[in-house]
Image: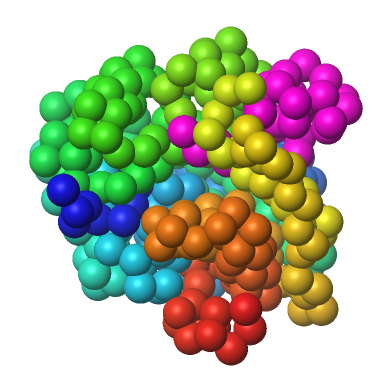
Amino acid sequence: MTPKFDVLGIGNAIVDILVPVEDSFLAAHDIPKGSMQLVDEETSEKLYAQLGVAIECSGGSAGNTVAGLASLGSSVAYIGKTKDDQLGHVFDHDLTSLGIDFNTAKDSSGVSTARCLVMVSPDAERTMCTFLGACVNLSEKDIDPAVVEAAAVTYMEGYLWDPETAKAAFRKAMKLAHNAGRKTSISLSDSFCVGRHKSEFRHLAEHDIDILFANEEEILMLYDTRDISVAIKAVQQHCEVAAITRSAKGCTIVSADEVIDINGYPVSDLVDTTGAGDLFAAGFLHGYTQGLDLRTCGRMGNLAASEVITHMGARPDVNLKQYFLNNL
């Protein structure tokens, strides 16, 4: 059966609060520059009160990816948990306004909708303090079989592998997808995330995941090596496809038959690296679900990533479909 959706994203439903800061602000609050740390609701609110003018928009890794896919013209759906509060409605409005199918039931009580303070230094380095809130309440009951079975690819973010209930939700989604003859995909998200779940992520790569997304540090950590060629040979035995982002060097796409190195697009006006990996996945998956060859998929990933780092925020600042027509 022809899929209704090209991609279904499942992830942490987080509202991003983007704000420029000086390095002195980070030092004064003892926040390591470039880090991503979890904070409680009280700490998040205290920091927010001391920040300047901010941009508030729906975020989360998989949320950013499906937003990029929608901008490219893909048909997409999303599953993620929010609370029935102000930020929850911000998240809902942002996604649905892009034409994304998002119908996950909201929590009526408990902790508030997740938010991430994304503090961007003058050199474009991002430092994140995240309150996970309601998003970690995602459970198996939130996984709609009809939506999973209707998606060509189900894409999940590794960040959500921490809570046991969310892990069970991922396992349900992977089983439903494969039983329906669909593909599964995951982003390793963060090297610290890989450190926490290395053995489980390896098992997923070998048995449950068709398309793996990772940056260079994450794939090296996954396979306990500092030699990228060793990591490539290992993942080549596991996944159908592995897409490895390598910052300014571009990306390496790995399949059983080939290893493709693809140069990145030059960027002269780097502003904010937030969302680069998320938009790479969007570009790649758009090409993949359109049946394009892996080299073209990698080029599309690089191009989408190169656009998002030229402005504040983890979402496209232009219509990516038109941007691709002009630049690919």
Vertical arrangement, residue 139 with respect to residue 325, above or below:
above
Residue, far top: 199
> Residue 268: where, in percent of width, then height?
82, 78
Left or right: residue 53 versus residue 9 is right
Q: Residue at x 27, y 23 (%)?
A: 175
- Point out the stretch of residues depicted in magenta: 210-236
Left/right of residue 81 with respect to residue 159 in the rendered view: left
Coloring applied to the structure: rainbow
**In the rendered image, is residue 92 in sight?**
no
Residue at horizontal 40 percent and vertical 73 percent from the top? 71
Q: Percent x, y for residue 304?
A: 58, 68
Q: Nearer the viewer, residue 238 or 279?
A: 238
Q: Position of residue 204 (x, y in %)?
A: 48, 20
Q: Tell me if 110 is positioned left or right of 211 in this view.
A: left
225 within the magenta span: yes
Q: Nearer the viewer, residue 316 or 236?
A: 236
Picture residue at 65% right of the left edge, 58% below the top = 295
The quarter of the picture where the C terminus appears is bottom right
Where residue 89 sits, quadrant-wise, is bottom left
* Point 82% across, 24% down: residue: 230
